[in-house]
Image (cartoon, coloured by chain):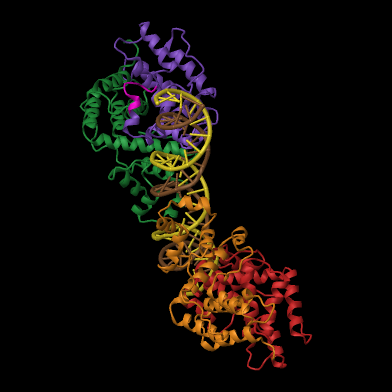
Chain colours: A green, B purple, C orange, D red, E brown, F yellow
Amino acid sequence: MLDAVATLLDQRGHTYEELTVERIAAEAGVGKQTIYRWWRNKAAVVLEALLTGRLKLTSEPVPNTGDLRADLMTWLDCELEQANMNDTLVMARSLMGALVTSGEETRSLFAGRSVWDDMELTQRIRAEAEAGGLHPDTDPTAVASAIMDPFIIQLLTAGHPSREWMEAQVDIVLHGALPR
Amino acid sequence: MLDAVATLLDQRGHTYEELTVERIAAEAGVGKQTIYRWWRNKAAVVLEALLTGRLKLTSEPVPNTGDLRADLMTWLDCELEQANMNDTLVMARSLMGALVTSGEETRSLFAGRSVWDDMELTQRIRAEAEAGGLHPDTDPTAVASAIMDPFIIQLLTAGHPSREWMEAQVDIVLHGALPR
Amino acid sequence: MLDAVATLLDQRGHTYEELTVERIAAEAGVGKQTIYRWWRNKAAVVLEALLTGRLKLTSEPVPNTGDLRADLMTWLDCELEQANMNDTLVMARSLMGALVTSGEETRSLFAGRSVWDDMELTQRIRAEAEAGGLHPDTDPTAVASAIMDPFIIQLLTAGHPSREWMEAQVDIVLHGALPR
Amino acid sequence: MLDAVATLLDQRGHTYEELTVERIAAEAGVGKQTIYRWWRNKAAVVLEALLTGRLKLTSEPVPNTGDLRADLMTWLDCELEQANMNDTLVMARSLMGALVTSGEETRSLFAGRSVWDDMELTQRIRAEAEAGGLHPDTDPTAVASAIMDPFIIQLLTAGHPSREWMEAQVDIVLHGALPR
DNA sequence: ATATAAGCGAGACGGTACGTCTCGTCTTGTG
DNA sequence: CACAAGACGAGACGTACCGTCTCGCTTATAT
């Protein structure tokens, strides 16, 4: 059933709103009630599908040339220009749709977890941290959030950002806003 | 009509989903059709209500003692502990709801604008920039985004963050992730 | 909408159970909610469709040769052998389905009315009464009921009755069970 | 299991529609599948429960003073005024529900049997026939049908009939509609 | 002063998804 | 190895809400 959600969101290009429970049931070859037996509402199914990584976020891995900033920009460029970014956008939009619809207890699926935990981006930053390339005591997850979250909100609100915008945002996260 | 949206969202504690067009019309003492005469769908009304500042985001101004980091933490603490954060949460959730529902053209209300433009937080950072307290070429809006966006997504997904989480996130933005 | 019910019941040979509200809505070119705006449930719609004579009961008029018993037997024979009886059966089954499903207030559609009021059979008996062919103080409606109701229940329970069964039933009603 | 049906229908006041197979199974302390092992559907179970007399129709026997008409009226009055009539009504409603739902083969449970065969009313009429109180060649079952069936349909459609209505109906069956 | 128009409230409508319910089948685990 | 327990596919139910539409009423302008 979760795979059905991923299929519909990913391949068929459905929005969260367009994604009906009956479609999910049909795609999964399952009765509607069976879905409601296991999840309390549509939001919960979709959320779980997303959080369990059913929707593959990007096909491109983040390069690791040793230069973190260059790697990040390369990857973001690559994502933006290719259609892959659509995946992230679909993912983000669906995620927000599900979150906004859902109640408190559905939201608890997020307990002790960050949205981008499983992303390739996070892994690249984690690698950099392990290689000693980050300031000690820096949480790689926090860095990933500081890059991805503005990016996501930008995508959701104003659409594809410019390269300059992205550079500015990345630089703030890497070098800080304060004078150095 | 926009004020009716704000009233319903703010005082009555409605979600974007719970906010029906008929309720808005009733609250505004207006016929449903009149709403559709001016906006193309529910998302557009709500979005405009939010973007025109109908939903007052915070009552507390960000202090300016000269120490930006301390001021930010003071303010975030204050927000978190008071109920004001609920306003931001309601605002964020409604915003996401409207965005997810809306089509491309409704989203264009965001053209050339950042979500947090009008916030007190942004003003405080802008003040710091003008006082020369930030690295040259740093866009205050980008800094505000880098702080608020992870905060919002954290609120939407996992709920109220811990003080440590907030400090880590603020420090990354101020000092950068790289070694200094 | 009521005509849609009649069409579906009559021409398409649906049972009350097979008759879905969505089908009725589709046949009538109407939204489902519109049906529920005017009737409280499926039973009420179907009941009203039946009671307002949307389902034409029989095409054959009851003959009037002056001999009531002969006329009744002729008519019953004719009905039984032709497909017309199916109409009555469909009508009766639907009626019972609706009645059994419905609540008290829906049943009140029957206030001061007899099921077979509009039937040709009742009219024939009424004609006989006016011609003085019945015992004074005999209510034609009661006579029609005494003939039709056992007939209907027989049809619903055991299927097509034999000619002997019908004769026996008619004779009891005409001549009485007591010795004469 | 059949007793469970009777219990639910009689004591708990359930309608045929409200009578779930799962409820029957629960009441009987039996698995649902076991019911379907013995009957092809819900209608068949309920029908058999009713036809095997699990639902005791009336507690009051029909008196036999020698005056058939007086006895019938006494009994009908008594039934009407007491709650016993509810039993008959529940029985009739359930019967109709089951019949309407059921297919042809379930209906065959009625083969060569009349609905009211086991009723006390039928026995009283049969007694009268054996005592020579009825016209020769009169089938007691037919007489019982001619009295009960309009009565049942009246109950199902318009509710409790008046005493006058009942007298008229009984008189037609006893003396006939024709002039005497 | 009357006529024509234009904007509005009210709310019915077609459509569509929701989440619930029950049927009758199929599966599993226990005594 | 039969049976209770109950998950399952299917699909109808009745509710909610969207965005469109029609209807009168009111107000504003035009003759």
Question: At which x and y percent is residue B10?
Answer: 52, 27
Q: Is residue C1 left or right of residue A85?
A: right
Which SS does the magenta portion mostly show? loop
Residue at 23%, 36% in the rendered image: A83
Image quadrant in which the C terminus of chain A is located? top left
Q: Compared to D71, does A14 lie above or below?
A: above
Q: Compared to D107, does F27 lie above or below?
A: above
Query: Start and end of the magenta stretch?
Result: B108-115
Question: At which x and y percent is residue C179?
Answer: 69, 91
Identify which residue, A110 or C180, lies in the foreground.
Answer: C180
Question: At which x and y percent is residue A78?
Answer: 21, 30
Magenta stretch containing residue B112, yes or no? yes
Identify which residue, C8 or A179, lies in the foreground.
Answer: C8
Residue at 36%, 38% in the rendered image: A94
**In the image, farthest residue toward the right:** D65
Q: Is residue D53 visible to us here?
A: no
Question: At which x and y percent is residue B110?
Answer: 34, 25
Residue C171 lies in what quarter of the image? bottom right
